[in-house]
Image (tube, rainbow, N blue to C red):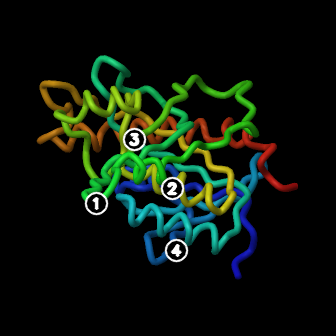
Amino acid sequence: MEEHIQVVVLISAASEWRAVCELYPEHELQTSPYGEWFTVCEADRPPLVLMHGGWGKIAAAGSTQYAIDRWQPDLLVNLGTCGGFRGHVERGTIVLVERTVVYDIHEQMGDAAAAIDSYTTDLDLSWLNMEGTPPVLRTQMVSADSDLVVDRLPELQQHYGAVVGDWESGAIAWVATRNRIPCLILRGVTDLVGEDGGDAYGNAGVFHSAAGEVMRRLAADLPLWLAASAPALRS
């Protein structure tokens, strides 16, 4: 069994991971079944592992459980990106996820709402000390193995009050909660989707550029969030 690591930081998309690796060029990369990882040990914060977990719900769920089994962390952190609903949130907004809804479940034999409810996760953040943390939008995240589809935006807003969506948060939150591991999900809005389409749809360069900016901000703020998470860490 690996030694206990207090904090594991999961990074999902490849663009997000590349941006993070550029910030830690001297750290030795190691491999897991899901992607690369490396350890950061600095005097002013607890030792942590940064791990590329992969994109989509399957990779996110598998890599989250792998990280929990391997390092037995006190805290799981997911840093990443998300899409925003135009007119309801601004590009560059950092969101602190309080609830996740996995909405791409299409039940034909029974009640789809009941199936979606079973994968909806409320994250207990009562241990988080928000004093001194950067400004964020505390909200819920809708997750699916899909970019936001224009025709579904009204439904997602009406039924779930959604203003942001991603691919992985729902799976990460669900697995962490069932393992009783405190989970902190922080994601930045890279692009907006509205009636006229999405900023990055058909132009992936928009996403890649914005993802780098978001990940640099989140990495820079990580020490503040770890200090705010101290109540969740074992001494």
Q: Please give the name of the residue rendered at 65% of the width and 63% of the height, measured from the top-left corner.
A: 179
Quadrant of the image containing the C terminus: bottom right
Q: Is residue 226 above or below residue 68?
A: above
The disc at residue 139 is none
Q: Residue at label 4?
A: 30
In this orientation, does residue 20 appear? no
- Give the residue type at disc 4: Gln
Pick out the residue farthest to the bottom.
1
- The image quadrant where one finds the N terminus is bottom right
In-image side of 88 versus 101 (left or right): left
Looking at the image, is 16 positioned above or below residue 91? Answer: below
Q: For residue 4, what is the image quadrant?
A: bottom right
Distance of label 2 from label 4 (alpha carbons): 22 Å
Q: How crowded is mark 1: few (under 14 residues within 10 Å), some or many (20 or more)?
A: few
Give yes or no for contact between labels 3 and 1 (Cβ–Cβ under 8 Å).
no
Q: How crowded is mark 4: few (under 14 residues within 10 Å), some or many (20 or more)?
A: few
Which residue shows up at 37% across the image and 22% down it? Answer: 89
**Callout 2: 10 Å neighbours few (<14), some, many (20+)?**
many
Going by the numbered disc 3, the residue's amino acid type is Val
